[in-house]
Each structure stands twice: as structure tokens, then as C-alpha cells.
Amino acid sequence: MPSQENYAIRPLNTGDVEQYNALLRYAFQITEQELSECGWQDDEIKQSKFPVLERADVLGCFDGNDLVSQIAVYPLKMNIYGVVYPVGFVTSVCTYPEYSGRGIMKRLMHQSLEHMRQRQQPVALLFPYSIPLYRKMGWEIISNKISYTVKDRQIPSQLQAPGRVHRVNWDNEDFRNLHAQFAAATHGCLFRNALAWEEYWRWDEDDTVVAIYYDAAGKPSGYMVYLIKDDIMYVKEMIYLTREAQQGLWEYIHAHDSMIDEVRGSSYYSDPIAFELDDGDIRETIRPYIMGRIVDAEQFFPKYRCDPTAENVTIAFEIEDHFLPWNNKTVTVLFHRGECSLSAAAAKHHVKLSIATLTALMLGYKTATKLQRLGRIEGEERTVRLLDDVLLHEAPYISDYI
């Protein structure tokens, strides 16, 4: 086996689609049966990868002419407390087993994060297959997924929303516009570009349904995407701009009670749904969902929004980042009237934390007080309390798995 020095890392292009697809299929064990059950043919899967290789940043490691490891970064935009941040969503991370343990993926990850820095994407996201592995590279959990099962008898039955629900096609303009409106109003939500929408539908069955709630004035204000199979309604996604739309969608679900035995779905809001149901004795499971990391702290802070009541608060963040050396420094930030800026002034308040902890803190997954109790932040208690005072606190809503 050649040494690492003989491995070549380069961007992949459409000429590499055969090897790119083969590595994905092997690593994730996608079988012909699974493809056919979802309506895919092998050549269609291959063709579907062309847009990824054309529009995403895809790096591969080659042993001679053979692709042995790869990583892709989708360029997306994310709402972070009302500010649209360019972000990179890391996906298609895979290596042939015989090449694992050779440091190849670390090299690919590092180069991908360098590319994000160059493109001024200060935040990176991924769906982890190994939380401990990514934590070693400065990533941290930033969002949860709540899965629930509601029996037919527990579906709310007394709701009477004044609007109506219509089933529409997957490419319906109201449907996509609703998601864009929701993303613009929801901290943590990703804006879906064409590539993200393609991934959204990639493995869905043909009888997956989109239903939109229109209020009494005919304005679309919520939707759900679902599939009914074997007497179970599977809710892939439910979003709403108003409480009325939420109630209207649950009323629509109740209209199916003669067809289904239970509803299974997922929520990406920070709170479980049991409290909202008349019969809240349902089964809910919460699991970590998306990990993130700040790619470049000095690019991140100037766009960040803080509490609008903050007045000239300067805090020095002593950041430890063993994977990306440009973050391994002290960054002083001025929090003032909802905006942040880098400062050269001496700071009275200091905290010490890792880049992973900084990411969880700034994206709202954990408070500074909680992180200090966990031993993840070093600093005086009054400084930690002050930090919580100047920051906004809302857990990110991230539903997309690219």
C-alpha cells in the first residue's frame, strides 16, 4: 500500500462521477432493491450526482487513479438570529475501509474548511455519523431532532381553523415560497437552493404528499409533507407561520383518522409537542441531530446580532482550536445595541473556551451558564452571567439533512 505522501487530493468534477457514485454506494450500502423501491434506476442516481459535482465543493483523495476518499460541501445560507449567513454543509464524507485510519479524512476536512474560509462561509454544518470523531476536529452538537408517535385517539379533534387545506404538487410555488418565508423568520433554518431541494426529495416515494394550509383570505401560511403507508401517516415536515395554520394542519391530520392508526413525525423546534396536545401521553424521543463549527471567528462575529439592550460590553474570548490554527487566538468583541464588532480595546471581561463550545454558545444550543457548569467555559461567574445577558437565546431549528 502506498504511503500518504503518494496520495493526491484534488477537486472532483463530472468526469469523476462514476467513482464518486461507487464510493457513496459502497460506504452507505445503498442496494439495488432500495433504489428500485424509491423509484430510482442506477443510471438516474448517477445523473443526479452531476449537479453536486458542478455546484458543490467536492474534494477527493486518489491513490493513483483510484478515488479512495471524498468529502462534499454544499453552499447554503442560514438564518442566524435574523442575519443571513453563507454556510457550508459538509456531506458525502466517506472512505473505503482499507484506507481508514491513515489521516486521509482529516486532510480532506481541513482543506474543505480552508476553502470555506476563503469563500467567507464562517459556519459549517454536518450530520454526524460519529459525534466523538467530529468533536476531535472542533465540531459540536447544535440542534436536536424530536421524533414522536401520536395514536389516532390522541390526534386533536376539537380544532376548527377557518381556512382550508389543499394538496399540491411537489414543485408548487406557494410551497417553496412558504419555506423561504419560514426560513427568513426562524433562527437556525436553512434557505433551500435548487441543490438542497433536489436532496430534499431524493429518496421520497412517489405518493409522498404536500398539503398547504390557506387562511380565510386565501394566504398560504403553513404546510406539511407526509406519506400514508401501512395505516401510518409519516409526517416528514410540518411548518407554519401562524398558530392558526398549525391548528389547521392538525385538523387536516384528524380528517384522516379513519385511514390511519397513528401519526409518526419529527419536529425540529426546541420544545416537545406533548404539552400542546389534549392527550399529551405520547412517545417522544430526542436525539442530537446536526453538528456545527465556526470556521473563522473573526469572520463570524461582525455579522452576529446580540441583545438590543446591550450597551458597550466588551468581552475577550480566548479560543482554543487545535484543528484550525487561525482561530487559536484571543478575539475581543464589542456588544452594543444589537450589533457586534471586533475590538482592539482592552477588555475587562475574559472567558476561555474551545471553538466547539463557542459554536454551541453563539448558535443558542446552550447558555454560557450551562456551559460553565459543564466545565466548558472558564471565567468569572459575573462575566458568564454578563455574557448570557448580551446574547440572544433560541435553539436553532435545522431540519435539513443534506
Image (cartoon, helix red, strand yellow):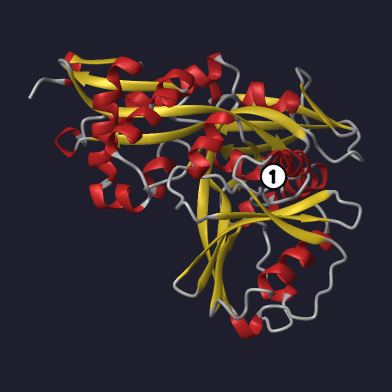
Q: Secondary structure at mark 1?
A: helix
Please state if 209 lies on the left or on the right of 386 as rendered: left
The picture quadrant where one finds residue 301 is top right
Q: Nearer the viewer, residue 175 or 380?
A: 175
User: Callout 1, which amino acid?
Assistant: Phe
Q: Nearer the viewer, residue 385 or 13?
A: 13
Q: Is residue 188 above or below residue 54?
A: below
Residue at 43% from the left image edge and 47% from the top image edge: 203
Residue at 26% from the left image edge and 39% from the top image edge: 25
Residue 228 position within the rendered picture, expressed as x and y whole percent measured from the top left? 52, 66
Please state if 269 lies on the left or on the right of 131 as rendered: right
Residue 140, visible in the rendered structure: no
Residue 390, visible in the rendered structure: yes
Residue 237 position within the rendered picture, expressed as x and y whole percent measured from the top left? 61, 55
- Residue matched to label 1: 175
Report the residue that reaches farthest toward the left: 1
Please state if 99 lies on the left or on the right of 46 as rendered: left
Residue at 55% from the left image edge and 77% from the top image edge: 260
Please state if 331 lies on the left or on the right of 345 as rendered: left
Q: How many marks?
A: 1
Q: Quarter holding the N terminus? A: top left
The picture quadrant where one finds residue 183 is top right
Residue 91 position within the rendered picture, expressed as x and y whole percent measured from the top left? 42, 35
Q: Nearer the viewer, residue 38 or 166?
A: 166
